[in-house]
Amino acid sequence: MKTFDYIAPLSKKQLAFLMKISNTTLQFYLNNDWYEELKAIGYKKEKKVLSPLQISFVEEQWGELDYSLLSNNTAYA
């Protein structure tokens, strides 16, 4: 369960880290499986950062993300 209501924008690299998948696998999901839905909420393939709304959509599709991983890993904080 999340301890906060606000979802911050995340880079694709950060999102892949939270999802515990490779950047390539994330790109496949974003640009193929979920592309039409994400495009409708402002997603662009060339952008490196996803908006809170786009992150929320991904989380609905994937399942809950463990945001504490970001604060525990200085490479992504």
Image: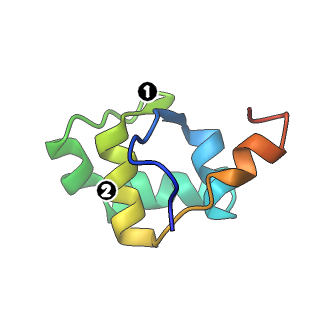
Amino acid type, mark 2: Phe
Compared to residue 69, the image places residue 73 above or below, namely above
Disc 2 is placed on an element classified as helix
> Closest to the observer: 5 or 51?
5
Disc 1 is placed on an element classified as loop
Total tally of numbered discs in the picture: 2
Label 2 or label 1, whichever comes before in sequence order: 1
**Residue 38: assigned label:** none
> Closest to the observer: 47 or 32?
47
**For the point 74% across and 32% down, which residue is it?**
77
Q: Is residue 61 left or right of residue 64?
A: left
Amino acid type, mark 1: Lys
Report x, y in % for residue 46: 43, 28
Query: Of all residues shown, which one is farthest toward the left?
Result: 40
Compared to residue 18, the image places residue 47 above or below, namely above
> Closest to the observer: 16 or 6?
6
> Which residue matches tag 2?
57
Spatial CA distance of label 2 from label 1 is: 16 Å
Q: Are marks 2 and 1 in contact (CB under 8 Å)?
A: no
Disc 1: CA contacts within 10 A as few (<14), some (14-19) or many (>=20): few
> Which residue matches tag 1?
47
Q: Is residue 46 left or right of residue 12?
A: left
Report x, y in % for residue 26: 55, 56
Disc 2: CA contacts within 10 A as few (<14), some (14-19) or many (>=20): some
Tell me the mark number nearer the camera, choosing from 2 and 1.
2
**For the point 31% across and 60% down, which residue is it?**
34
Report x, y in % for residue 17: 69, 52
